[in-house]
Image (cartoon, coloured by chain):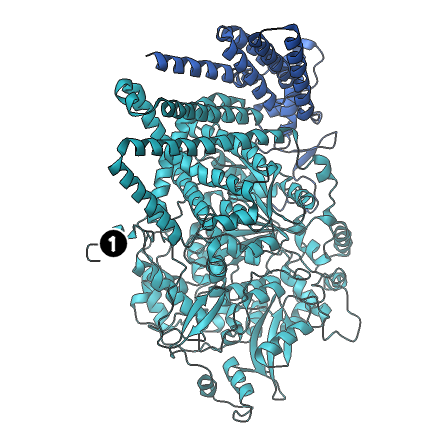
Amino acid sequence: MSASLSPSSAVPGAVAVPGGVAVPAAVAVPGAVAAPREPIRVRMGVVLLAVLAVLVAELVAGVLVGVPPHLLGVGMCLSTVVVFGLVFCFGAITIAGFAAGAGAAGVVVLEPGWLAPALLALAVMAVVCGLAPGWARVEAWQAVRSAPVGEAGQRALSSSAPTSLPSRLAVRWRTDRVVAAFLVLAFPPVFVTAAIAFITWTAHR
Amino acid sequence: MTTGLDHDTGAPAAGPTGAAPTARPAVAERRLGDVLRDNGTITAEQLDAGLAQARRVGEPLGSVLLAKQWITRRQLYVALAEVWGAEMAFVDPVDVDTDLAQLFPYPMLAREMWVPLRTERTDDGELQVVVASSGRPSADVEREVLERTGISRVHQQVTTDWDVQRALRTVWRDEVVHEAVSSLAERRPEESASTVFTWPQVLSAVLAVLAVVVGLVLDFPTTVVVLLAIINVTIGLSVGAKALISTVGTASETVEQVTDAEVAALTDAELPRYTILVPVYKEAGIVGLLMRNLSALDYPREKLEILLLLEEDDPETLQAALAAAPPDIVRILVVPHSMPKTKPRACNVGLSFARGELVVIYDAEDRPDADQLKKSVVAFAKGGEELVCVQAALNYFNAEENLLTRMFTLEYSSWFDYTLPGLDAMRLPIPLGGTSNHFRADMLRELGGWDPFNVTEDADLGVRASARGGRVAVVNSTTYEEANMAVGNWIRQRSRWIKGYMQTFLVHSRHPLKLVRAIGLRQTIGFLLTIGGTPATFLLTPILWVLFILWLAFPHQFSPALPPWLQYVSLANLLVGNGLIVYLSLLAGFKRRSYGLVAYALLSPLYWMLHSVASYKAAWQLVTKPFYWEKTQHGLTSHTQEDGEDGAAAVTTTRPAELPAGSSAASATVAAVASAHRRVPTAQALAELAAPAAVPPVAVPPAAGAAAAPRRDEPRATASVPGGTHAPVAPGAAPPPDHVPHPDPAEDLMRPLDLDDLAVLQAELEVLDERDLIAELAPGLVPDRPAAPAPDRARERAPDRGPDRAPGVPPVPARRARRPLPPLRPVPRRPAVDRVAAAAVGQVPGQLTAEPPTRPPVRALPAVPAPVDRPARRRGPLPAVVPTRQPAAPPAVGSDEARPTTGRPPVPGMTVVRLLPAVPAPPAPAPTPAAPAASRRARHAANAAPAGRGLLSWLDRGPDE
């Protein structure tokens, strides 16, 4: 302990890496060549305002054009899914996935038959999450700041910058992230559909 | 910990209270560095490096040299004594005159870091008081002594800060324990959980039960509908509040409370001193791991103090701590035995000796992020004056161990990553988590510390801080803990937490209107729905599940009994509630990038049913054993075991620099300690002062002083009164009922101790002394006992220390309370020079005398000044507390230092601080007015009730009762 509780404030037992971030020795692996970049900082307030603006515009336009309210609702939910889904995939912000999933739930509430297409679309989003660079950056950034570093963090740190696109995608790809993202996105529509089906069944038994 | 040292001399600046020093030498003082270099303790290069580091971190030279382990603490203070032109004394607690000690309140001494040692008569016939201080000789000390004793002549010696603290813990043991246990309950009883239910609460509960019974009798269906509606509303509001709070808390994902740039901008010089409290009980296996985990902290060690809080009845952990051989910044503090033996009690003791401006608690297995302390510093700087505490997030490092750890991790991720940030963002009261609470030490003391009667003292403290106008915030740093991996262990832990929430709710809802006025309506509602709503939800959810299953199984019989709206509301409550729980866990796992755990969030409803099981256990214990601390067993995980081995191997220490043989400073000091003045018992001295004409100035028989002082056999009771004073009660008058209940003594799965057990245990612990404990743990480290111990003591101990006891089995002291007590006899005092001189020639100090190294008997004492009615709060510069190793010279018998010997790994720098036992009182002593501590101890033992001080405690009694 005395050896590593250094008098200075340098991270004890740390390995200095370019970029100024000290990587704990337990994290630093031979392949570590560069500090992870800062994660993308998407301002959720801005995103919310943008979504609200889109929804209001959609609503006004729909009313003016005379679109049926049912269809208008579906459209607004789809817009929510798309915008928040993009933020979720490329901005690497978890709560955006919640909003996208809620939008999908709205879609299947209005159009119960659309569950399968909705799930398909959400699966595509999850696959994009598995390849999106934002998530890899967040994981690598988080890995150097917290004690238990999983396999992902080590891999993120040890990965040297691949040149070709397939190798870059291979480095970023994480199946567990894809599955988890799909659960985050798909849980609201599936749960709502199941709840409606259950209540319907109990009412008619 | 390294406070108040003069930058020129490395010494405590301007005396303990910051006043102008006295007795300054006519010649200019030498500088500390010069003294140390000249006597060969350090080299010129080390001095240069130390001065450079001192300038960089803004700490005195002495602190830096200690932190670098270039000198020992005693070497430092020997040099300081030379700088100040004062005598050096190594204070042994047995040398402190207890009569004199009782005249001085321990909080004041702890704050100012000095202790009165004895009274003596000088060659010119005048009385003088000898004090030992870790600071520069000060006029304030003289004034204080004059005020309290009437003796104007004061001889100030220099001693180490650790010696002062050890003497305080030993001589003022009862005060230390009393302060830790009863401080809050006495000073602010309305904020203490020592009273479980107030009469209005009991009355309300009785009325509610009566109303339900009457309703069921008069109109069963309507009453059931009303009850179900109430249940639904309660669950709905609670779940809804949590959903709202957590949704707000999701914003924390994109908001960093403290950025890396802010941390990087910190300079070492501006960092405050930090104290880390680590309460450990029966966790011997992970002490080594603790050393490694804390070693990763990024903080200047000159400003770091780690207090390892061990319990007196836990020799295994003490042994492990000794084996880990931590460096000087780790101080082992053995907390005196008392009830309740809870974590908050240990923390309160630690707090009273903490020297840091900021204080944090970690558990033994914790792995905090390296920059957590610095982030907390920034958070405090940004948080304003009202910020009391910063809570770091908790998570688990062994999440993948089994299903339970996975579920636990998901729950923690949701709570600390979403719910607490949500509470922070909405400025609602935050129930603190178990560890990683960073406090401003002075504000924490003002709050009264932790409530030892509350089994979730942390949650209670967070709410109490809010109720007093303080604020609790969260910081974006994580501490990784060990997740509970066994269901039984989990239920025990969770039942304690839920019971603590119930206690906290009951405490802070005693005066609802007052609470609203204190924290506001919105915050009160938030408190009701989070602290009160959590256990309520756990308790009520099974009812909804039962209803749901009945409704599914018997739709045609069940439906007509309940109105459709209630059926749908109940169903919606179940669906929405469980859906929210699942989804929050899902999101939290994803946010933590614990992708492998996300799928397990779907099992959350089953996991939350376990909470309901624990909540019913908690509710039962709240009534039957409200203060029972369900101990959670740590160190079960394979992660910990593996790392523990590593950690133990990783711990390295450097042998302290040996005191140079024949050092001029050392030899001069030893010579200086020899005092030619004749010691005078304090009682005699005080009597002499009170009637100078009647008492001859010299050659006073000892009996005269004893007669002048109040006799210990004079019956006089003391009573604790709110405000922290101990008002004398007239002899014969019935003492007022102790309003501080004594909690359940059981700390483990053993049967609860009964009254006799407690009394015996108390007596046994007093018999055990430091030397015996160390000898039991590590026989090779301690020389043999004195050749001729007192016969009564030898008789008492013989059965405990026979060779037939299995190795490794902790000693079982004799049941001393049932034997004739030894006669009360004064312990002849040895001048300190004996011990030091013996050490200098390598003689075993304990062999100098046949007296057992025990605390002197408690004799008749003068009137004790009333304790301060507020927690000790630091004023002025912090006293000097510097980490160091102990010197190579063997310490005195009865001191608390582990000694490296051949055949065993040396333990350099280890200091085991353990309170010396008090000499047992004579049989059935009546409380005397001059011995409030003894009175308190007797009252404590007499009131120590078996498990179950709650409403249903009569169930535990036998038929005879």
Tell me which corner region of the image, top left, top right, bottom left or bottom right, holds residue B407. top left
Chain given the colour cyan: B
Q: Nearer the viewer, residue B604 or B681?
A: B604
Position in image of residue A13 (x %, y %): 65, 38
What is the crowding at mark 1: few (fewer than 14 residues within 10 Å), some, or many (at least 20)? Answer: few
Q: Where B867 sits versus B606, above or below?
A: below
- Give the total of numbered labels: 1
Instruction: Determine the residue located farthest toward the right in the rendered image.
Output: B28
Q: Where B521 sits versus B232, above or below?
A: below
Q: Amino acid at mark 1?
A: Arg
Chain given the colour blue: A
Position in image of residue B51 (x %, y %): 77, 54
**In the image: residue A74, left or right of residue B76:** left
Measuring 46% from the left and 71% from the top, which residue is drawn there?
Answer: B727
Q: Nearer the viewer, residue A205 or B107?
A: A205
Q: In this rendering, does residue B914 appear at all?
A: no
Position in image of residue B454 (x %, y %): 44, 49
The chain carrying label 1 is B
Position in image of residue A156 (x %, y %): 64, 22
**In the image: residue B139, left or right of residue B844:** right
| Element carrying mark 1 | loop
Q: Nearer the viewer, residue B213 or B620?
A: B213
Tell me which corner region of the image, top left, top right, bottom left or bottom right, holds residue B416. top right
Measuring 68% from the left and 62% from the top, which residue is drawn there?
Answer: B876
Measuring 24% from the left and 38% from the top, which residue is drawn there?
Answer: B217
**In the image: residue A153, left or right of residue B735:** right
Of the 4 image quadrants, the one containing the C terminus of chain B is bottom left
Measuring 41% from the left and 59% from the top, which residue is drawn there?
Answer: B740
Which residue matches tag 1? Answer: B957
